[in-house]
Amino acid sequence: MKESKFRDAQKAFITKQGEEGTPVAEICRKAGISQETCFNWKKDYAGMVPTDMKKLRELEDENRRLKKIAADLSLDKEMLQDVIKRKL
């Protein structure tokens, strides 16, 4: 996944502007982002402060890493079970 050029504080500031009633088109023009990006950030980060956003990103990264480990282990288990079945 491509890393954003915006920091968490910038994302929080942009989403807060939208919550305060600034038109989305104006926010996007000033920030140099598309309206789709603005709506995605609003959906993902509405009401969060930068520290919460950082914690969320860290938890998502850890979750991704753990899912990969679980997938690798289940594949190893399946391969070992196949080897045992062949020997019997």
Image (spheres, rainbow, N blue to C red):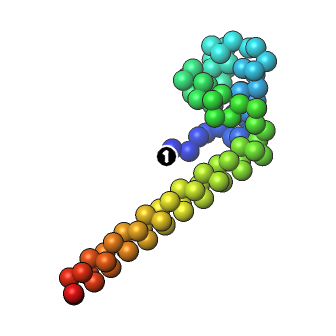
Q: Residue at x 63, y 20 (%)?
A: 28
When asked about the image quadrant of residue 62, the answer is: bottom right
Estimate the x, y position of residue 77 in percent, counting from the top left. 38, 74
Q: Residue at x 24, y 81 (%)?
A: 85
Q: Secondary structure at mark 1?
A: loop
Asked whether residue 32 appears in the rendered view, the answer is no
Asked whether residue 73 appears in the rendered view, the answer is yes
Q: Residue at x 28, y 83 (%)?
A: 84
Where does label 1 land, which residue?
A: 1
Estimate the x, y position of residue 74 in percent, counting from the top left. 41, 68
Q: Is residue 1 left or right of residue 21?
A: left
Q: Is residue 67 left or right of residue 53?
A: left
Q: Residues within 10 Å of mark 1 (few under 14, many from 20)?
A: few
Note whether 42 is above or below 68 in the view shown.
above
Estimate the x, y position of residue 15 in percent, counting from the top left. 71, 27
Name the kind of residue labelled 1 in the image.
Met
Q: Residue at x 58, y 29 (%)?
A: 40
Q: Is residue 69 left or right of residue 19?
A: left
Q: Which of the image's four quarters has the C terminus? A: bottom left
Note whether 8 is above or below 86 in the view shown.
above
